[in-house]
Image: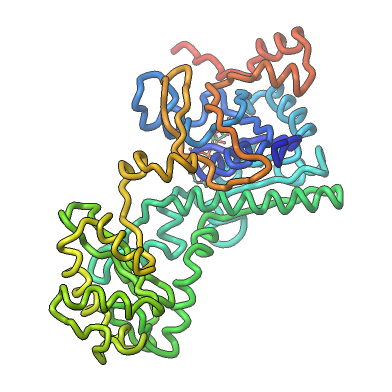
């Protein structure tokens, strides 16, 4: 049995932050009803690679869901929404501020209709505070949550990271909150409002940078390879520094292409073996006993020399060759893997993290798999729904509407966009 079997979710989310959460819950067995504007989630048509087919942007974030289209700007559409609310355990949304209120369904009203329901809401900045009214996208959250100011090199511009920490990161936070609230509702019979602000989620993911922010009040950050000093105030961008108690950096390897790099952590326990192995090849046979590297504090101080020596050693090896040499010494390391490397990787395929699916509009395509492996209920990934694919099925099987009712709601425009008025 799937872990969330029997949990029904009214999923009004769109774009990435919300759908990534509801897809995970669907992969854990929840019945996720994607409740769409009759025009469809905007991402269905964004960045299309196949004409007239749902884009990969959409298909990769909406697997294992059922789609119903409902026009919330009609009285009949609102009635369908209310009926669905009564049958669901969770409702979730990530509209811009105030959209649900404008539909006439603030949280208080939703709770009145179904006191057991758990409501999940993602906003850029939450529902309180000076930023509450603003919309947000991924990189706005990365900018405002501390990630961008701490990513890059000191003399360069701030950088966004490729990992979608603002959107998908927030979706993960929401999933945790929803499951906790669901558990509480099972005990108390009462639902609650679960809010995750993208800015808060990014701050949570930047926790170690706020550790360093406070340490700067007492002194320099000795493990940083870039200059820091007591009272500096802002945590600087520090390139590929490890950010932890062990020193680390990216080392450029043969043949020195864009992704020919190996990330190496010079863990305290392995420094001796590492220095003995590379010392003679870089013209420093006594590297293991050199006083500049004697203790971790010395290695921190002289880390740029250590990285130079490691880069020199790496000139003769590819990232995979260097990985092998270092793994034999128990040095934690990993090649910088491109998307191409990952799509072809035996380990990735073996762990079902690059999964082939079929789709009626686009044919074969791949999705990134389920990263949470439940031993008793592994995820079975199914393709995303086409727009409104399950409208009738949901009206009939979930709400028990008969043919006559479906017909009358359909002709009243409950499931469609109003026709454009003639000019
Ligand atoms: C992502 C975001 C910026 C997109 O903004 P947007 O395209 O203007 O969309 P909004 O969510 O503000 O508005 C959706 C519109 O669709 C309409 N709509 C949505 N579902 C509908 C339905 N079933 N029937 C009728 N209309 C519907 C809403 O009424 C609203 O129109 P309105 O402004 O006239 O009320 C915004 O939704 C947002 O800030 N969300 C919260 C943060 C977030 O999740 N961002 C990450 C996205 S990956």
* Above or below, 238 relative to 394: below
Q: Picture quarter containing residue 7?
A: top right
**Residue 349 percent location from the top left of the image:** 43, 39
Q: Picture quarter containing residue 237?
A: bottom left
Q: How many numbered marks appear?
A: 0
Q: Is residue 100 visible?
A: no
Residue furthest to the left: 283
Q: Is residue 344 visible?
A: yes
Residue sitting at x 67%, y 36%: 29
Q: Picture quarter containing residue 354?
A: top left
Residue sitting at x 31%, y 56%: 335
**Residue 13 percent location from the top left of the image:** 58, 38
**Residue 148 percent location from the top left of the image:** 37, 62
Residue furthest to the bottom: 291
* In this rendering, position of residue 409 left or right of residue 171: right
* Above or below, 250 relative to 255: below
Residue sitting at x 56%, y 55%: 197
Which quadrant does the C terminus fall into? top left
- Colour scheme in use: rainbow
* Above or below, 192 relative to 368: below
Q: Nearer the viewer, residue 314 or 414?
A: 314
């Amino acid at each position: 049995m799937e872990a969330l079997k029997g949990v029904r979710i009214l999923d009004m989310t769109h774009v990435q932050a919300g759908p990534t959460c509801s897809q995970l819950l669907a992969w854990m067995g929840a019945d996720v009803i994607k409740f769409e504007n009759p025009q469809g989630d905007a991402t269905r048509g964004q960045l299309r690679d196949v004409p007239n087919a749902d884009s990969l942007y959409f298909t990769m974030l909406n697997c294992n869901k059922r789609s119903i289209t409902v026009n919330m700007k009609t009285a009949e559409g609102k009635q369908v929404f209310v009926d669905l609310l009564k049958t669901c355990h969770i409702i979730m949304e990530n509209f811009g501020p105030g959209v649900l209120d404008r539909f006439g369904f603030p949280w208080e009203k939703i709770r009145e209709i179904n006191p057991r329901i758990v409501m999940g809401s993602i906003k850029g900045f939450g529902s309180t505070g000076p930023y509450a009214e603003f919309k947000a996208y991924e990189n706005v959250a990365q900018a405002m949550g501390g990630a961008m100011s701490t990513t890059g090199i000191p003399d360069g511009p701030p950088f966004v990271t490729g990992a979608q920490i603002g959107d998908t990161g927030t979706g993960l936070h929401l999933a945790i909150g929803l499951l906790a609230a669901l558990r509480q509702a099972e005990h108390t019979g009462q639902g609650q409002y679960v809010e995750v602000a993208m800015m808060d989620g990014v701050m949570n993911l930047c926790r170690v940078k706020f550790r360093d922010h406070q340490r700067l009040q007492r002194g320099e950050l000795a493990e940083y390879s870039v200059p820091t000093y007591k009272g500096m105030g802002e945590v600087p961008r520090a390139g590929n520094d490890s950010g932890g108690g062990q020193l680390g950096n990216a080392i450029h390897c043969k043949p020195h292409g864009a992704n020919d790099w190996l990330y190496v952590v010079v863990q305290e326990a392995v420094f001796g073996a590492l220095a003995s192995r590379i010392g003679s090849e870089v013209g420093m046979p006594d590297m293991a006993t050199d006083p500049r590297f004697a203790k971790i504090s010395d290695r921190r101080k002289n880390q740029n020399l250590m990285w130079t020596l490691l880069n020199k050693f790496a000139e003769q090896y590819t990232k995979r060759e260097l990985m092998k040499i270092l793994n034999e010494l128990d040095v934690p390391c990993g090649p910088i893997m491109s998307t191409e490397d990952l799509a072809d990787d035996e380990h990735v395929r073996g762990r079902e993290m690059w999964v082939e699916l079929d789709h009626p509009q686009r044919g074969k395509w791949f999705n990134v798999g389920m990263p949470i492996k439940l031993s008793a209920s592994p995820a079975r990934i199914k393709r995303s729904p086409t727009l409104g694919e399950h409208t009738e099925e949901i009206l009939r099987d979930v709400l028990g509407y008969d043919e006559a009712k479906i017909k009358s709601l359909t002709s009243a425009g409950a499931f469609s966009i109003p026709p454009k008025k003639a000019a």
